[in-house]
Amino acid sequence: MKHKLTPNGHFLLRGVGVSVLTYCYYFTVIEGFAGICQQKFAILTFLSLYYYVVLIELKTTHQRFPMLGRLDIDPEMIGESKLLTTPGTDPALFGTAVMSGPEHVEVRSYQTFRIQYTTGKLGLDDTGAIRLALRLISDAGSLQTTDPTAPNYVTARSSGDGQLFLKYDRNGGQRPWNETLTIYQRGGYLKPGETIEIVLGDTTEGSPGLLMSTFYEGARVIRVMADVQATGNFIPLPDTHLAFTVGAGPAHRYLAILPTRRRLNDIFCLGLKAEDLWGNPTSKGSTRFAIESSLPVEGLPSVIDFASASGAMRIEPLRVAAEEGILRIWLTAEDGTVVEAGPMQVLTDGPAHFWGDLHGQTGETVGTNSIEHYFDFARNKSFLDVTAHQANDFQIKPAFWKKLNHLTETLNEPGVFTVLPGYEWSGNTAVGGDHNVFFRKEGARIYRCSHALVAEHDDLDTDAHTLTDLYNRLHDEPVDSVMYAHVGGRYANIHFDHDPRLEAAVEVHSAWGSFEWILTDGFPMRRRVGVVANSDGHKGRPGASYPGASFFGAYGGLTCFLMKENTRDAVFEAIRRRHTYGTSGPRVAIDIKAELTAGGTLFHRNPIAEPDCATEKVFVCTMGDIVQITDKKVKVSVSVDAPVGIESIELRRGTSTVALWRGYEDKNLGNRLRLMWSGAEYRGRGRNTRWQGRILINGGCIERFSPVNRLNPEQTLEQVGSKSVIFNTITTGNRMGCDIWLEEESSEVEVTTNHGELSLTLKEMDGKPVVMSAGGLERKLIAQRLPAGGLATSAHFQKEIEIEEDGDTPVWLCVNLEDGNQAWTSPIYLFQK
């Protein structure tokens, strides 16, 4: 049943109030978020206006966060190597540079920029050069100098003697300024005052221009450096700042987001945002929504005008007070488009669900955009409950560590928005590999793997060069901490060392891909860890980290924390008790419980490491629990409520699937053929696997075609004519593919890929998948017949499982969704002795 709700009233203070609030927010975020937060008067003023304009105005919070304009990163916060020697201290020695072109551009547009370099007092010697450097994290077009009709064509000309030679290198500079264009002076020299003009995206001979990135950048900076005496020592030009802003495109879709579980009378938020084609929140899309819900919701208006300057808004405070059930909210736009939020389980008691992305970077290290933008995005654009920032330790300057701690303390809101201080220990895989470190409160030391890009060496003696060193340092650190094992550029080496008192979870999914092996490799060693997923996004978009068109091949993950309240203490306890599960992006309500006939002893910590930990007698246990039992068998109950159809649920015992749930029977199978490819090359940084090929239909035609989990719109996955599909895509452990509805079930389907071939006929397929193994790391192509219509969004089933006599019996779930996404629960660790 849908409930129409009465309006809560109109905005009372649209003019002056909102203008003043916007003015305060501008100076808070744009002019120095951290600094203004230190001024108590500003805080009180801001909060007073917030309460008066927002809460009184509508009884729900329609927060307006203006689109950030140019938001440069403080250069003093950026970790990078510093020059040891320079030709002199006079800025006039090296020359100057200015840039002409648009100050604000749209994502994935073509643009032209002209940079004019004027030589300084020293001129520019024969074989000397100037260099343009851009940050590594970008999916803008790669510069090229060979084809004047193609995108990203670059030219250069000088006003002096000699010739110019251009060399582009995607990794020619030092992190984070890896991308370089070097313009060499040959066959002559330039006198003081002579110029070189570089045209990025020269359209003179037919090039469309320079292709912009797919994501918002508050300041796309171009650093200009000069080697005026041909020594190979490139000096950044002093007082030269060339930059432009990359903004979102027009609205492509609207998203509405709810929590997945709350108790009766719990306060919660409905998040609403508009996204462009590439997943950026955009203000270029306004509409009026009529709102209905499946349960009565206090505080929910019946109509809302969406015209957010930031592309997103929070509607709060909301609560369900009358009845338990499943809450779904439908928002119908003026053009008839329906946006659905939920499902949200409403229960009388038990833990609630709080969603987090605790892993991402910003421009102060290797990423983009500022840390202020990062935290604003987490709370107000992706509607997270929990977040943290995880910069590579070898690039964290002392000043940035101090600023990070100040921000996490300032922005942490117990009960509403939990922010943890922390960092990524980024040791090489040979000595432990990437691990995320989180602190319960501010003030802890940072124990780096090295000072590779930190010029300040006052604390070199605190470095922890190996994972074992880090464990020892953290045990001596007064501030409490927990750790995750992470698979990034330097994947965590779980065979090197493991301390259960600190390392409580493994990250099975991020923007780098999906990695079940980081969990299952530990089963033989009795590694009793929880499952989490995060983004490790480098674009400043925690909680909604789209891969764009770069080397990241997956959408960033999310972790669900099962907690009674949203506080730092509760988050730490959930991590240590492994009461977490991870997804590849969607918010799915998952529950798994084991019923113990004779009861069992539940350990609040891992008894292998802490034998004297607290225990209790239980007859039911849940994900993450470590329980000693005498039962030879246990009954496992599974419940899943998802926002999309559920393809299957794998109930696993260790690495074996002991039950496979499908929401349909063979008699329900239709004319839909699902083809999904997945896997990676290997475990390291170059794990991306390219899938290239064709699907050919013989003896029939394609009735309908739909890509599944294609996250990069520029990757080829499309129908050609009535009988074929072509693809050229990338997986990095995650899944993608397509659904094909066939006119004739007797049609023969031929799949040809660069990793192998598969032939099948739809009418001969039952519900079991057909698998083509393709080497690499779990690389495979799966063909499956599905019902023609949508799949069930809820699942409930039970299964009896036998318990191993020796060692652990990890019982866990892998949920496969119709849209290609997945979810994984922390195992229940059952053991007899």
Image: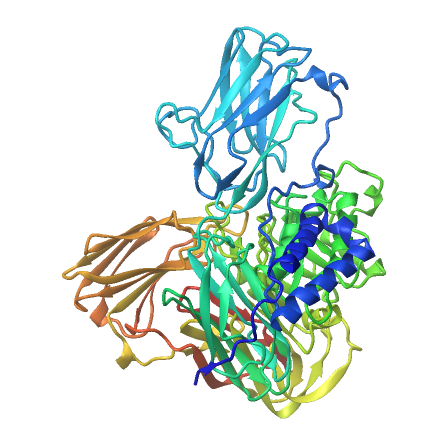
Return the residue nearer the eye: 25 or 684.
Answer: 25
Q: Position of residue 538 (x, y in %)?
A: 59, 48
- Residue 802 in sight in this render: yes
Compared with residue 380, is residue 137 higher up or lower down, i.e. above or below?
above
Quadrant where the C terminus sits is bottom right
Q: Measuring 64% from the left and 77% from the top, which residue is drawn there?
A: 267
Q: Left of 91 or right of it: where is 489?
A: left
Quadrant where the N terminus sits is bottom left
Q: Position of residue 427 (x, y in %)?
A: 68, 48
The residue furthest bottom is: 598
Return the residue nearer the eye: 408 or 635.
Answer: 408
Residue 789 figure quarter: bottom left
The structure's colour scheme is rainbow
Total residue callouts: 0
Residue 770 figure quarter: bottom left
Q: Position of residue 35 (x, y in %)?
A: 77, 49
Compared with residue 51, is residue 406 higher up or lower down, i.e. above or below?
above
Return the residue nearer the eye: 405 or 38.
Answer: 38
Q: Left of 15 or right of it: where is 773?
A: left
Q: Position of residue 779 (x, y in %)?
A: 42, 56
- Residue 469 in sight in this render: no
